[in-house]
């Protein structure tokens, strides 16, 4: 990863060391991982904001990183924390036209969990 003032955080549920996003990415082929990591680098270099078609605002503070690899469409839902952290919440392989509501709801629950934990740990 290139130098950036932003830090990438892989969300893991409070009390767990397992990250759903990291698990998803590391299960992919080397070339897919390389492309995903290059997109994550781009987020860091551009203060968390990428134009369409690379990223899209999804809901409240949630953004969707959009990575196309061949005919596969990988998505990573993330948010930008105030302390210059980019928190990768969840990842999935998109199979339909719209982002599944269940994926948005899952990422939003992870967002709430992360924010709640950050407030109590200060």
Image (cartoon, rainbow, N blue to C red):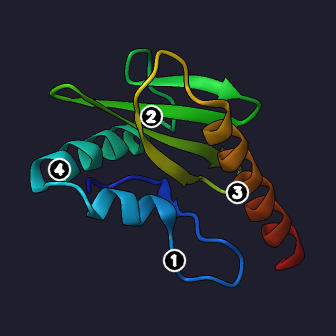
Question: In the image, which is nearer the foreground, mark 1 or mark 4?
Answer: 1
**Which tag is nearer the camera, tag 3 or tag 4?**
3
Query: Viewer-proximal residue, 60 or 41?
Result: 60
In three-dimensional space, the C-alpha distance between marks 4 and 2, rounded to whole angstroms, equals 15 Å
Compute the Cα span from label 1 to label 4: 21 Å
Front disc: 1 or 2: 1
Residue 100 position in % (x across, y down): 59, 30
Classify residue 52 as left or right of residue 64: left
Q: Are marks 1 and 2 in contact (CB under 8 Å)?
A: no
The quarter of the displayed image where residue 54 is located: top left
- On residue 18, the disc is 1
Label 1 crowd (10 A; few <14 / some 14-19 / many >=20): few
Q: Which mark is residue 65?
A: 2
Disc 4: CA contacts within 10 A as few (<14), some (14-19) or many (>=20): few
Image spot of residue 37 (x, y percent):
27, 50
Quick one: which residue is furthest to the right in this view?
A: 120
- Dot 3 lies on which element? helix
Q: Alpha-carbon neighbours of circle 2 within 10 Å: few (<14), some, or many (≥20)?
A: many
Image quadrant holding the C terminus, namely: bottom right
Q: Is residue 2 left or right of residue 49?
A: left
Asked which quadrant contains residue 27, the reply is: bottom left
Cβ–Cβ under 8 Å for marks 3 and 2 = no
The picture places residue 23, in percent across and down from the top left corner, at 39, 66
Identify which residue, 41 or 75, lies in the foreground: 75
Instruction: Please tell me the numbered disc located at residue 110.
Output: 3
Among numbered discs 3 and 2, the one appearing first in the sequence: 2
């Amino acid at each position: 990863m290139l130098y950036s003032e932003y830090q990438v955080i892989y969300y893991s549920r409070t009390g767990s060391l397992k990250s759903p996003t990291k698990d998803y990415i590391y299960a992919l082929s080397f070339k897919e991982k390389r492309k995903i990591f290059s997109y994550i680098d781009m987020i860091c270099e551009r203060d968390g904001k990428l134009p369409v078609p690379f990223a899209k605002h999804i809901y409240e503070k949630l953004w969707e990183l959009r990575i196309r690899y061949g005919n596969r469409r990988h998505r990573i839902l993330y948010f930008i924390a105030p302390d210059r952290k980019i928190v990768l919440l969840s990842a999935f392989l998109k199979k339909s036209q719209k982002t599944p509501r269940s994926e948005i709801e899952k990422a939003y629950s992870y967002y709430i969990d992360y924010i709640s934990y950050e407030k109590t740990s200060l």
